[in-house]
Image: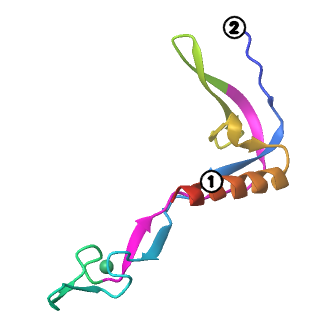
Amino acid sequence: MKIETVYSDGDRVYSIVRSRGPRTIRSKCSGCDGVGDIILKNGEKFTCPKCVGWKVILKYGPFKWKPYKRVIVIDKVIVRKEIGNILDIMYVELNTGTEFRAGDLFETRKEAETACGERNKLFAQKL
Ligand SMILES: [Zn+2]
């Protein structure tokens, strides 16, 4: 099987990676409108069961994409297959052996930064 690859050994490319920690997003509790208490029709006041009095809801946001810290020199290409189907084409960084997905590599740092911006924007819309 002949497989077309975009980059080859020795090419210098830029990549993007996902940051490790999830972003925490605080939003005003919709159950109590950010007050922390709810008042029943008879006037009794209770701690909001939705936010348990915290007034905010914490959402664990998605990972954030950022440009990889250095220029990658490609050492080799790995093709992952499963029963004849190509699952992924991975590019391996020289010296470190770190693997990068084909879709996460770019020819310039600017392209890598643009891709981070677009992916982070997509994540933000999903919240
Ligand atoms: Zn609440």
- Residue at the location (38% across, 77% down)? 29
* Depicted 101 relative to depicted 50: above or below: above
Closer to us: 66 or 43:
43
Q: Say the numbered circle drawn on residue 77.
A: none
Percent across and percent down for residue 12 are 83, 42
The local crowd at label 1, few if under 14, some if 14 to 19, many if 20 or more residues have their Cα within 10 Å, is: few
Is residue 68 visible from the viewing direction of this image? no
- Residue at the location (71% across, 58% down)? 117
Name the residue beneath numbered marker 2. Answer: 1
Res. 8 image quadrant: top right
* Depicted 2 relative to depicted 7: above or below: above
Percent across and percent down for residue 67 are 71, 56
- Specify whether tag 1 is near ligand 1 (CB below 8 Å): no
Horizontal side of 95 relative to 51 (left or right) equals: right
Percent across and percent down for residue 41 are 18, 85
Ligand 1 location (quadrant): bottom left
Amino acid carrying label 2: it is: Met
Amino acid carrying label 1: it is: Leu
- Residue at the location (50% across, 66% down)? 23
Horizontal side of 111 relative to 18 (left or right) equals: right
Quadrant where the N terminus is found in the figure: top right
Closer to us: 27 or 93:
27
Name the residue beneath numbered marker 1. Answer: 122
Percent across and percent down for residue 101 are 65, 37
Is residue 24 visible from the viewing direction of this image? yes
Magenta stretch: includes residue 61: yes
Q: How many marks?
A: 2
The magenta-colored residue range is 54-77
SS assignment at label 1: helix
